[in-house]
Amino acid sequence: MNYNLNDISATQQKTSTLRALQKLLQLITEERKNLVLALGAILANSGLNLLGPFIIGYVIDKYVVHKNYHGVLVWAGILLAMYMVAFVASYLQTRLMGGVGQRMLFKLRNTIFNKLQDLPVAFFNQNKAGDLISRVNNDTDKINQFFSQSLMQFIGAIATMTGAGIFLLAINFRLGVATLLPGVLIFIFTKFSSSWIKKKNALSMQTTGGLSAEIQESLHNFKVIIAFNRRDYFRNRFDEANKQNYTSAIAAGIANNVFIPVYGFFAGVAQLIVLTFGIYLIAAGNFSIGLLVSYLAYATNFYNPLRQLAALWTNFQVAMAGWDRISYILNMQTNLPVMPAVNVATANGAIMEFRNVSFGYNDGKEILHNINFTLQPGKTYALVGPTGGGKTTTASLIARLYDPVKGQVLLDNKDIRSYQPAERTNKIGFILQEPFLFTGTVKENILYSNEQYKKISNQQLEEIIKAAGLQNLLHIFEKGLDTELSSGGESISLGQKQLIAFMRAVLRNPALLILDEATANIDTITEQILQDILNKLPVTTTRVIIAHRLNTIQNADEIFFVNAGEVIRAGSFDHAVNMLLNGERVS
Ligand SMILES: Nc1ncnc2c1ncn2[C@@H]1O[C@H](COP(=O)(O)OP(=O)(O)OP(=O)(O)O)[C@@H](O)[C@H]1O
Ligand SMILES: [Mg+2]
């Protein structure tokens, strides 16, 4: 399955602008009241501004030309009042939409973050964390900016333009057509340049994502960088990413501003047309000075918002480019789909069966070819084999971190794909090769995803730990259950991390427990304690142990040898050791 967000084929569901806008508006359906109020305010503002020139033209012809100053003053007062109301309406609109934009941003970020939590492991293998962070933080803000700053102005500008256009045509149709002609040219220019602008902005956001991916990667690996004194390596890579971001941002900036001079030019041409044509009409006795003044004002009222529209249209394209990047995530297939349950008898009452399973990462090279094996309840299995042989991959398929490309994995007489995630994770405990701990206390980490013991006290938990024979493990932590782990468990040793991961998995009492090199970093005495605990698990618990240390697998009921895409029964311990020695020499 292709989950790469920067790969066109994975994200081909291109949405039309209108559909995208519709989807965005769905996010703010609860804001209907605010949107209607803001719309009312912006339309009132446009309407009042449109009445202005008409009144001025009227006042010139009726009062100014006849030197009736009283009338001029009265109308000036009326105009001032109108402009003040327009000002208040505009302010109200800005306030309302600012709130709408922020709430939308809040919701959008939550939606994407929740979606990210639902995506399968393959998605995270194929996308860089930094780029995802940039999508959640940066791209969503572009949409907020459009909604809070541009949407209503956009509508207001269109209303003003339409009104001005109608006035222009109504006052003098021929002059109106001539004045609006440059506007048509602008419209055509806009239509053809929009996708180019959007593309430039999409590229700019992509490089911003790349930049944040570089930062993320270097921060994540800082120990290696310092240990090898390779600060220059990341410095160069960052420099390169920064350069790319700079170039694409400049290109986007040019694209975003290309409208301004073009619109300015056409607006100037329109003014010229009004003046020359208008004076010709006055000379012919078909037009008054007052009308010409109104006319010039309406031409300005038509072309000024058009110029504003240029910037707003650009904001819209930027928001749409951001929305595309976000909707790629939102449209990704959530989690691994749950299939309808069908009973399929597993061979010989096995708890787990691999039936003709083939698997490869990212649609690439096959790592496992046509694998068949069964795991019986209550038995202990060991997976051995050379580095990179496919042990972790096999374990990941047992726990359904991935789905097989071909074949079936059966868990308890059902396809593993038909289990709800909660049910599946209750049955299967997986201690990963690279244990991951969260910032928090040892207790919180032990009880992670443990519904049964979610709300118990320290004392109760200690009792449970004691009953499970784990009490000796707790003494390793200075403050016991309350020991604080900082930044993903950086503050404790790898072996200590593995112990917590061990407790986390064992206390959930799974029917099938997988330990992937779970004791590789633990001293032999502690390992013996873990061994005892494993032996004390309920008799029905199936254990799958992956280990390089031979003593760890000595007590296994059966040993599988995993190498070069195959999982083979290795028979006795001695035979397995032989295979391992030969296999490792071969690989
Ligand atoms: N996330 C991944 N994406 C692509 N290929 C992967 C991924 N993880 C593992 N592989 C490939 O799959 C093969 C098997 O890897 P796997 O991790 O299963 O080996 P392993 O037997 O667990 O090795 P080790 O003993 O080192 O833990 C390797 O060739 C590896 O390159
Ligand atoms: Mg492994």
Image (cartoon, rainbow, N blue to C red):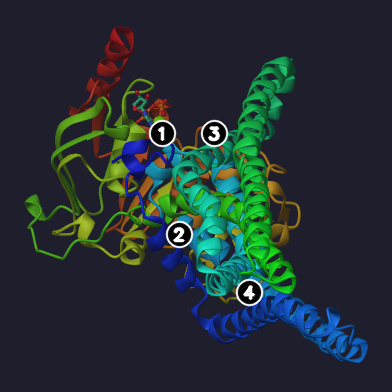
Ligand 1 closer than 8 Å to the CB at disc 3? Answer: no
Q: Position of residue 182 (x, y in %)?
A: 54, 50
The kind of residue on which mark 4 rests is Val
Q: CA distance from mark 4 to mark 2?
A: 22 Å
Q: Nearer the viewer, mark 3 or mark 4?
A: 4
Work out whether mark 2 precedes mark 1 in sequence or the reverse, and give the earlier one.
2
The nearer-to-camera label among 4 and 2 is 4
Q: How far is disc 3 from disc 4 in space, using C-alphas?
A: 60 Å
Q: Which residue is mark 3?
A: 524
Q: Position of residue 469 (x, y in %)?
A: 51, 58
Q: Give the amino acid type for the residue marked by disc 1 in the picture.
A: Thr
Badge number at residue 552 = 1
**Helix, strand, or loop for circle 1?**
helix
Marks 3/1: CA distance? Answer: 10 Å
Q: Mark 3 or 2, which is nearer the eye?
A: 2
The residue at which mark 2 appears reads as 115
The image quadrant where one finds the N terminus is: top left
Q: Earlier in the sequence, mark 4 or mark 1?
A: 4
The Cα atoms of the two marked residues, 2 and 1, are separated by: 40 Å
* Contact flag, marks 3 and 1 (Cβ < 8 Å): no
